[in-house]
Amino acid sequence: MTTEPREATEPLALSTALASFDAIWSPRVIARVNDYDVRVAKVAGEHVWHVHENTDEFFQVLDGELLIALREDGAERTVTLVPGSVFVVPRGVWHKPSSPRGASMLLFEPSGTLSVGDQHEEVPDQVDVTVGHAL
Ligand code: NI
C-alpha cells in the first residue's frame, strides 16, 4: 500500500470538462479519488446490456434525462434519472443505460472499470469500449 502524495491539480468546472469533447458514450476521467475515477460522459440513444461483476457503479445526471434498464430476479425494470438524481447499479446486476433525448452524467467507479463491463451483449457502433479517456 503506497502513501505517496499526489500532486494537487487546479479546480475544474464540470461545464468546462463537458465543453471539451463531443463524443457520446465515451467517458472522460476528470478526477481520481483514491483508486476510483470520477468520469463524465455525454450520452444519447442506447448503450449496451452489460454487467460489472465486481463493482457497483454510481451515476449522477447533470443535464437531460437518463434511463437505466435493470434485470433483477428474472424481471426487467427501468429507472429514470433527471438532473440532480443519483443512482447506484449494484455489482452483478445487468443494466443498459439509454437516453432518447440526450443527457450528460457523472460516474464514480474504480479506475480500470470497462464501460461495457465484464460481460456484455453486442456493442453498437455508438458505444466506446473504454476505461475512460483523459480530458
Ligand atoms: Ni455499467
Image (cartoon, helix red, strand yellow):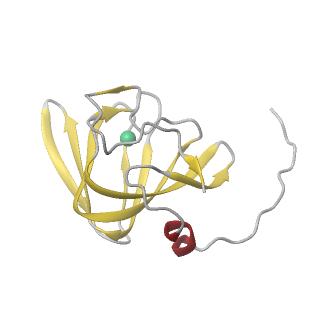
- Residue 14: x and y in percent read 54, 71
Where is residue 78 drawn, in percent x and y?
Answer: 18, 50
Q: Residue furthest right?
A: 4
| Residue, far left | 75
- Write down which quadrant ligand 1 falls in: top left
Residue 60 horizontal side relative to residue 39, left or right: left
Residue at position x 43%, y 61% in the image: 22
Query: Is residue 62 shown left or right of residue 44?
Result: right
Q: Residue at x 43, y 36 (%)?
A: 129
Taking the spot 59% from the left edge, 74% from the top edge, the residue there is 13
In the picture, the quarter occupied by the N terminus is top right
Q: Position of residue 3 (x, y in %)?
A: 85, 41
* Res 120 quadrant in image: top left
- Residue at the limit of the structure toward the top, as seen here: 119
Q: Is residue 8 above or below residue 29?
A: below
Q: How many marks?
A: 0
Give coordinates of residue 135: x percent, y percent. 60, 57
Q: In front here: 27 or 38?
A: 27
Residue at point 66% right, 51% down? 32
